[in-house]
Amino acid sequence: MIEVLLDEEDRMIRDATRRWVDAELIPLEQQILRAEVEDNWYEGEEGGRSALSPEQRQTIQAQVAEMGYDKLDLAVEDGGAGVTEMQHTLISEELSRTIVPLNLGGEAPNTRMLEELATPEQQERYLEPLKRGEKRSCFMLTEPNAGGDARGIEMRAVRDGDNYVLNGTKIFITGADRSDFAIVMTVTNPEDKPRGGFSAFLVDLKETEGVEIVRPINTVVGGRLFEVAFQDAVVPAANLLGDEGDAFKPMQRRLGVRRLQIASRAIGWAQRAMEMGGAWAKERVTFGQPLSNRQAIQWMLAEAHTSLYASRTMVYDAVRKSMAGQDIRHEISVIKPFVTEMSQKVIDDSMQIHGAAGMTSDLILERMWRGARLSRIYEGPTEVHRLTNARLLLEAL
Ligand SMILES: Cc1cc2nc3c(=O)[nH]c(=O)nc-3n(C[C@H](O)[C@H](O)[C@H](O)COP(=O)(O)OP(=O)(O)OC[C@H]3O[C@@H](n4cnc5c(N)ncnc54)[C@H](O)[C@@H]3O)c2cc1C
């Protein structure tokens, strides 16, 4: 229905991804779900465990590489797939129709921030290895006293000769345990807060003394976040990313990239949930008729279809604007809460249609539901995005 926002190549890439997901990945889902119940695991990477055998993982990764999905974030000159932002969005949407884990490499948001701000030396030490997949990175903004209200962060970075000394605590950090370096948001000029005074630093996590992972924190999806303490951590002034006191705007652009990715993932989950709900509604007979004959169920599916149509229209429109170099801050403040809330509602309705089975780990729905639940918090909770939406709206009115 929204084909007009996509060109022929966009549609071809989307459809090819969808066919691959249907043919190769979805058939593996039962094995993944059973592994949890039967406690049946293979050895995974980096000492972890995996529901898929090494051969299965190898086959998938070979296909991922063949399609260039492991280099989605890279430009052609860096050996990347050379897909447009729209194609990236569509691929991410289609890949999210399944729970099969894929190692896609790349860290678009940090890559974008580094491309925009890194000095030639920083590019060589951090950006290039990141692009080649030789280094991994994470992003540290949130603190115990400030998350949604990002301008409330307190971590101090104080200049000392050729260095800065960092003190404070970061919390709920994704990937801190496996990252080589972090982009760390700090306060260098407290007197300029809240409008300015924020500076970003590139911190080598393995080599910098005074940086310590305090504890892992489990989430409702099982994935782990980390609390990280900085105590008199000395970071060379050469690792200041961008201008001192001016890191907030580029950080917002970084978050913008990520928030659109979150939205396309949420659309993928909801699409699959709707497909599953529709298929089950046609099959399951209660009181002498298939569920699909009941208006209560039809309305759930009609609502899901409507919400997905609205969500895709919004996201594709914002992506087109972003590709044209337009500022999409307002669009993002509309999209992030709308699409993540939509996704959880559609998945929840599909769980309802499936009855008891929908409440179990026999189906992928509960996993997607938990994923959607998290997505309503990270990268800014719904309420904070609505606040931004209203502020920008009132400024414009
Ligand atoms: C899975 C996951 C991964 C994460 N990864 C990272 C990471 O890699 N790096 C990083 O820096 N952070 C990360 N975070 C942290 C995340 O970005 C913050 O948790 C989020 O921004 C919310 O901050 P908070 O938890 O401090 O909530 P708060 O800001 O304390 O808000 C609490 C609640 O209050 C409400 N609220 C807040 N402000 C308002 C308002 N003005 N009006 C009305 N209601 C309001 C909202 O409902 C909100 O959920 C991650 C979080 C999760 C869950």
Image (cartoon, rainbow, N blue to C red):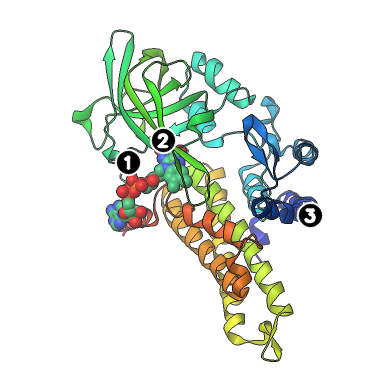
Q: Is mark 1 within 8 Å of ligand 1?
A: yes
Name the residue carrying label 2.
251
Q: Are marks 3 and 1 in contact (CB under 8 Å)?
A: no
Determine the CA span between mark 2 and mark 1: 10 Å
Query: Which quadrant of the rendered structure holds the N terminus?
Result: bottom right
Label located before the other in sequence (3 or 1)? 3
Q: Within 10 Å of the Cα at label 1, are there few (<14), some (14-19), or many (20+) other Cα atoms?
A: some
Q: Residue at x 53, y 20 (%)?
A: 126
Q: Are marks 2 and 1 in contact (CB under 8 Å)?
A: yes
Name the residue carrying label 3.
19
Label located before the other in sequence (2 or 1)? 1
Left-right relation of 146 to 183: left
Q: Is residue 132 visible?
A: yes
Q: Position of residue 189 (x, y in %)?
A: 24, 26
Q: Position of residue 195 (x, y in %)?
A: 26, 37
Q: Within 10 Å of the Cα at label 3, are there few (<14), some (14-19), or many (20+) other Cα atoms?
A: few
Label located before the other in sequence (3 or 2)? 3
Q: Secondary structure at mark 1?
A: helix
Discs 3/2, front: 3
Left-right relation of 243 to 344: left
Looking at the picture, tell me which residue is in the foreground, 319 or 180. Answer: 180
Q: Which numbered tag is attached to residue 150?
A: 1
Determine the CA span between mark 3 and mark 1: 41 Å
> Quick check: 384 above or below 359?
above
Discs 2/1, front: 1
